[in-house]
Image (spheres, rainbow, N blue to C red):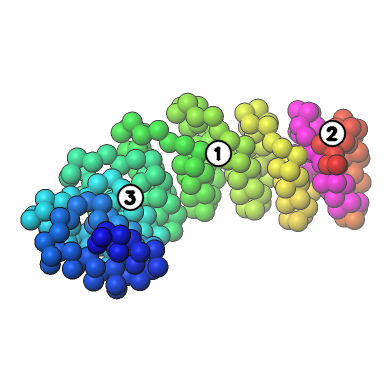
Amino acid sequence: TYGILLDCCINDKQMDKALEVFNSMRQQGCALNTVLYTTLIKGFARVEQVDRAMEVYQQMRSDDLHGVTPDVITFSILIKANCDAGRLDKALGLLEGMMELKLCPDEVIFNNLLGGCIRDANHILAKRLYHSMVEGGIRPSNVTFSILIRLFTSCRQLDEAVEFLKTQPAARRIVPEPRLYLQLTQACLRDRQGRRATEVFKLMLDEAPPTAVMTGSLLSTCVKLNMLATGVELLNMAADAGARVDWRDVEGLREASVKKKKDAFAEEIASAMAKLDFRGKRD
């Protein structure tokens, strides 16, 4: 009955009442367990009361009477909450606490820690965490790769991001999703690094062919940033590879070239359009 009442209070985000119920359970001598403690911690984390969640965690660690210890789920909730609150140091302390209890962190926990590194712009720590992750036998995923690409690009480490995407999916036997290449190509364009953008797009064409929408978004970004030369190069690469391209995105690039009086670009675009034969035209 107490457990049901506790769940109801948490679901209604009435955390003061939830704490009263929990304390009543203690006073009544009810058997407390990891699930009940974790449920209360999750409730405080959900309403972004991280300090109170940590207080419950400390109480849990000191509950010798019931012999309750946190599990991987408990730590996962607390690490994410602290990372989201910009308290990476606390999250790392929780990771150490896991190790003390001989608990193995999973991919979700490492992904949250890597995400916390983005806020602190700490790519050096992120690389150490990633190394610990793979050395510990924890298989990364496309989510992990996306987080690290975002981190490297936000820290202006584009070369490192490109090298990471070139090597790590194959090294970890993960099939890379096209969105990873799109993410990095867009980041290169936003940083006005046309050479790197074409390098990553070539990888994309070879490893994870883009959809027409993906290619169109890159061409549109080139037009928006007035990187017409890069846009034409991306278009030619797509045409040579037989990739799908929407004719309207190509036309947008051509119109921008004409407007800027870039006749040579317009001619290249016309040639590419002939190669594509308007493949990918939307109905």
Give the percent coordinates (x, y) of residue 39. Answer: 30, 57
Q: Are marks 2 and 3 in contact (CB under 8 Å)?
A: no
At label 1, which amino acid type do we have? Val
Residue 279 shows which numbered tag? 2
Q: Magenta segment, principal secondary structure?
A: helix
Where residue 26 sits, quadrant-wise, is: bottom left
Please say whether residue 40 is visible from this viewpoint: no
- The residue located at (46%, 42%) in the rendering is 144
Residue 84 magenta-drawn?
A: no
Q: Which residue is mark 1?
A: 162
- The residue located at (29%, 68%) in the rendering is 18
Secondary structure beneath disc 1? helix
Residue furthest bottom as drawn: 16
Please say whether residue 270 is visible from this viewpoint: yes
Distance from Cα at disc 3 to Cα at disc 1: 30 Å
At label 2, which amino acid type do we have? Arg
Q: Residues within 10 Å of mark 3 (few under 14, many from 20)?
A: many
Sooner in the amino-acid sequence: mark 3 or mark 1: 3
Q: Is residue 230 above or below residue 205?
A: below
Q: Is residue 282 left or right of residue 83?
A: right
The range drawn in magenta is: 231-258
Q: Which residue is mark 3?
A: 76
